[in-house]
Image (cartoon, rainbow, N blue to C red):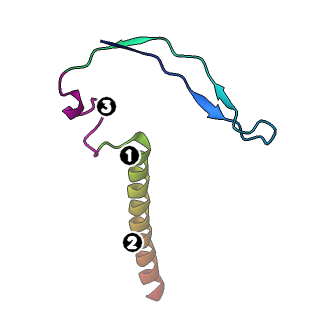
Amino acid sequence: MYEVKVRGGTYSRFFSENNKTYKGPFSHPRKILLYPDCHKRPHPKQGTGFEMSAGIIAGIICATFALFLLVVAMIIWRQVHKRQKQ
């Protein structure tokens, strides 16, 4: 069993304090139990790669609706254009 704490830091970009590192506080300790051959198991948060977000689904629906409106507009335009020729 391991106890893990994480701490973040960043380097200063100012000329007067060149190469100064600002470090944040440590996180709360967390105990982790590792199993044999754990590096060979897939990560539980990794998906199949075919997951679609709500934005992608909304985009597909909007694009489909726009194509539908385009087809309807073309059909109506064609009918009106035929009547004007007669």
Start-end of magenta stretch: 36-50
Mark 1 Cα-neighbour bin, 10 Å: few <14, some 14–19, many ≥20? few
Element type at marker 2?
A: helix
10 left or right of 13? Answer: left
Instruction: Give how far across and how far down residue 43 sits, in percent.
Output: 27, 32
Q: Could you say whether the residue bearing mark 1 is in a helix, strand or loop?
A: helix
Q: Residue 75: which numbered mark, if any? A: 2
Task: Tell which circle, 3 or 2, labels the residue nearer the N-terminal end.
Answer: 3
Direction bottom: furthest residue: 85
SS class of the residue under badge 3?
loop
Q: Residue at x 42, y 57 (%)?
A: 63
Residue of label 3: 45
- Work out how far the residue at label 3 is from the one at label 2, CA to CA, in angstroms: 48 Å
Look at 38% across and 46% down and name the residue there. 57
Of the two numbered discs 1 and 2 in the rendering, the one whose residue sits closer to the viewer: 1
Q: Is residue 25 left or right of residue 42?
A: right
Q: Is residue 45 left or right of residue 36?
A: right
Q: Is residue 3 magenta?
A: no
